[in-house]
Image (cartoon, rainbow, N blue to C red):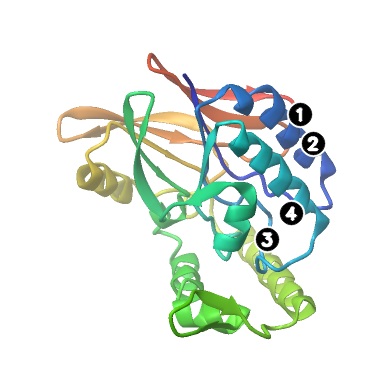
């Protein structure tokens, strides 16, 4: 069997070719897999599970069809879609995972994560990340209230139009800030990588976020480990294909 791992599609209504390429990937490749892992920044932005954007339904329907066919789907949030919640996950037939997870894939133990937590040299971003991942700030944005003996309910949250304006402003600010940062600052910190390997004791780590697809050899405590990095789906798709015999980074046209 085969496990596939993808990240950083940045799906949005302004780039239909990426959506079409993803749907083709589901039909032609993912349908033959046993598991599909999506490691965040799946969407270019996410302002709440109640957003009626038609793109979200198209994607959810395709993923649910895949799930119903027997492929297990798992999702780790990224820095663009960290507000994606249980409601949308149910629509897709996928399981939400924590920020960092060790998985069993075709006999391999692999540490998976979005990757932004490894980029600790970018102190401005890490400060922003801690702030937006604060539960009360997220509840304020979505206006989630917890009722007795029940799950959180969406209750008169900020209007979608206002949430969209906030998201666009944050995205524009992020893009502007990144243009002023060095490439090195926005890449992973090697000490964080070593720390993760020592903590989770896996031979492989796979992540996205940096948009620098590659497989890196990492020497730690006398052993060789491997850090796999997924690419963004700008002009072609990328995925890690895992079989009992190999782990490989693959690319494919839309």
**Numbered badge on residue 254:** 1
**Relative side of 180 to 223, left or right:** right
Nearer to us of marks 4 and 2 is: 4
- Gap in angstroms between the C-alphas marked 1 and 4: 19 Å
Decide: marks 2, 1 in contact (CB < 8 A)?
A: yes
In the image, residue 33 sits, relative to residue 54, either above or below, namely above
The residue identified by callout 2 is 20
Decide: marks 2, 3 in contact (CB < 8 A)?
A: no
Query: Label 2 crowding class (10 Å Cα cut-off): few <14, some 14-19, many 20+?
Result: few
- Gap in angstroms between the C-alphas marked 2 and 1: 7 Å
- At a point 66% along the width and 65% down the height, the residue shown is 49
Q: Earlier in the sequence, mark 4 or mark 3?
A: 3
- At a point 67% along the width and 83% down the height, the residue shown is 157
Q: Earlier in the sequence, mark 2 or mark 3?
A: 2
Q: Earlier in the sequence, mark 1 or mark 4?
A: 4
- At a point 38% along the width and 13% down the height, the residue shown is 245
Q: How many marks?
A: 4
**Relative side of 95 to 172, left or right:** left
- Gap in angstroms between the C-alphas marked 3 and 1: 21 Å
Percent coordinates x, y for residue 127 in the rendering:
45, 72
- Gap in angstroms between the C-alphas marked 4 and 2: 13 Å
Most foreground residue, 121 or 252 = 252
Q: Earlier in the sequence, mark 2 or mark 1?
A: 2
The residue identified by callout 3 is 45
In the image, residue 220 sits, relative to residue 129, either above or below, namely above
The residue identified by callout 4 is 56
Percent coordinates x, y for residue 25 in the rendering:
69, 29
Nearer to us of marks 4 and 3 is: 4
Query: Label 4 crowding class (10 Å Cα cut-off): few <14, some 14-19, many 20+?
Result: some
Decide: marks 1, 4 in contact (CB < 8 A)?
A: no
């Amino acid at each position: 069997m085969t496990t596939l791992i993808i990240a950083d599609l940045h799906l949005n209504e302004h780039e239909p070719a990426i959506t079409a390429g993803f749907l083709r990937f589901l039909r032609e490749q993912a349908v033959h897999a046993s598991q599909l892992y999506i490691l965040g920044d799946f969407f270019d932005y996410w302002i709440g599970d109640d957003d009626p954007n038609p793109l979200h339904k198209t994607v959810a329907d395709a993923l649910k069809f895949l799930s119903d066919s027997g492929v297990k789907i798992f999702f780790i949030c990224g820095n663009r879609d960290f507000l994606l919640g249980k409601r949308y996950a149910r629509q897709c037939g996928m399981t939400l995972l924590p920020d960092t997870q060790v998985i069993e894939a075709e006999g391999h133990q692999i540490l998976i994560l979005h990757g932004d937590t490894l980029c600790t040299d970018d102190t401005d971003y890490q400060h922003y990340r801690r702030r937006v991942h604060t539960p009360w700030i997220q509840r304020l944005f979505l206006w989630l209230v917890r009722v007795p003996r029940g799950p959180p309910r969406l209750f008169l949250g900020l209007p979608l139009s206002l949430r969209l304006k906030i998201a666009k402003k944050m995205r524009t600010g992020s893009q502007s800030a990144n243009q002023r940062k060095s490439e090195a600052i926005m890449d992973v910190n090697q000490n964080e990588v070593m720390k993760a390997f020592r903590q989770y004791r896996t031979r492989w780590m796979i992540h996205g976020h940096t948009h620098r697809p590659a497989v890196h050899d990492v020497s730690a405590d006398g052993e060789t480990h491997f850090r796999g990095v997924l690419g963004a789906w700008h002009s072609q798709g990328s995925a890690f294909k895992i079989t009992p015999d190999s782990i490989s980074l693959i690319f494919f046209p839309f």
